[in-house]
Image (spheres, grey):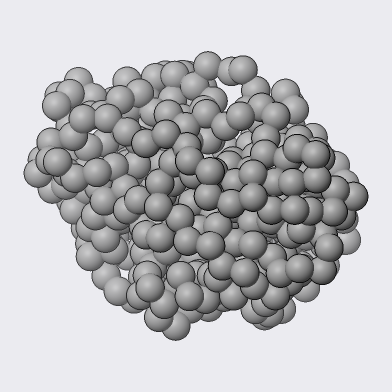
Amino acid sequence: MPFEIIDDVPVAPAAALVHEHGWQSWSPTADYPVTGRAHRPAAVAGRVPLCYRAGKPPPETSFQGEGLLAVDPGDGNPIRVYAATDGLQEVPSIRAFYSDGRVLVSADGPVELLSLTGPLPAALGTWADGFARRAGVSAIRPAPTVWCSWYHYFTKVTEADILENLEAIGEHDLPVDVIQIDDGWQAEIGDWLDLSGRFSSLTGLVSRIRGAGRRAGIWAAPFLVGARSALAREHPDWLIRDADAGYNWDQSLAGLDVTHPGAADYLRRVFGMLREAGFDYYKIDFGYAAALPGPRHSAAGPLAAYRDGVRLIREAIGPQAYLLGCGAPILPSVGLVDAMRVSPDVAHEYEPSDGDLSQPSQRGAALTTIARAWQHGRWWVNDPDCLVVRPAVERREEWAEVVERYGGLRASSDRIADLDDWGLATTRRLLSETPPRIVG
């Protein structure tokens, strides 16, 4: 559907703002001056489907929100919120173009307009309350505290690394509920029933974690299939279009067609195995892959397929398990997960390596975490990404402040032995506090 003008808003150019809401967890989201320019993807192969909305390129000189955009006229008049009438299975793109004291708003699908009391976060929160009711969100479950292996060990994590930190957490009496094993435990991206050579037994490792008085958590990217995987070789009919042209894991990646009965059964087996091993905390990453446009086994649209895939995982892990989404389309995930990553990955460095704020950096993580603070306590528990505060981390004090102010889910991802006195004290303090509900 082509873009059609839906509103023409007079604004005060020096004070007016546009809230541009990104497609998924890693897509930059921010409030911009109407006379400014929004962040756009770098020209890197595979970057758009990985971190932005595939097939919906944003304009360079105006704004584009995915299912949500808001304009603060800056003249004392109400905030104008433009939002998808559905938002779960149909998410239009909404554009705002400033010219000569006015903002023209257009959309390529059905949109509702609400005039709400400001400031912007409060208006967005008011709209979010209504969206939550329509999506069937019930009580928000508090998040456990977590230690995660990713930001020290990355894909090279070993069973011995997990046990080292489990012991160190006990020695320092850190208030960690969950030990989360991140990427690196699986044989390949897509081969989730087999272990990498660095792990001998998930069941045995879970037993050690539970024996230390902690819960066991695990990471997976269930909707991605790597070209090196046995799954890709044996079941090419389960795959949908390219999800990442070699940017991650040094291989091309496809999406998993969760509408295919064989693929759906495979997911049930994977998460049934993990449940039987004793995990009760799950991070499902790269969720965007299930929502990519492209042909599928069934006639279900991509967002319906994505939602069915997450519901399938929830059924497999059971209602009491804690489910964290990441890299997932934001609006279509409401009502499906307990917590959601609301930002790009953090990094040891403040700036992204190529200037693209969808990429790992403290700047990008902070920008989008702050702009999405109004989602916390309304749709889920917001996850700003992990606390990383060892001495090697740039501007670590600033990142700790963001996590403290905006972090609903508190997770540490340092090797405990690498923390200095300040890092250890900060980690202990932030894991000990109960994050407040942020309301504006």
Which of the 4 quarters of the picture holds residue 73? bottom right
Report the residue that reaches farthest toward the bottom.
139
Quarter of the rendering occupied by the N terminus:
top left
| Identity of the residue drawn at 35% across and 51% down | 90
Give left or right: position of 198 versus 34.
left
| Identity of the residue drawn at 12% across and 40% down | 298
| Identity of the residue drawn at 29% across and 42% down | 302
- The answer to whether any part of residue 316 appears in the image is yes
| Identity of the residue drawn at 50% across and 58% down | 83
Residue placed most toward the observer, 7 or 417: 7
Quarter of the rendering occupied by the C terminus:
bottom right
Residue placed most toward the observer, 168 or 180: 180
Give left or right: position of 252 versus 96.
left
Location of residue 156 in the rendering, given as x and y in whole percent from the top left corner? 53, 34
**261 relative to 41, above or below:** below
Which of the 4 quarters of the picture holds residue 359? top right
Location of residue 393 in the rendering, given as x and y in whole percent from the top left corner? 81, 43
- The answer to whether any part of residue 333 appears in the image is no
Residue placed most toward the observer, 191 or 143: 143
**289 relative to 273, above or below:** above
Location of residue 37 in the rendering, given as x and y in whole percent from the top left corner? 76, 35
**431 relative to 90, above or below:** below
Location of residue 358 in the rendering, given as x and y in whole percent from the top left corner? 63, 37
Residue placed most toward the observer, 261 or 163: 261
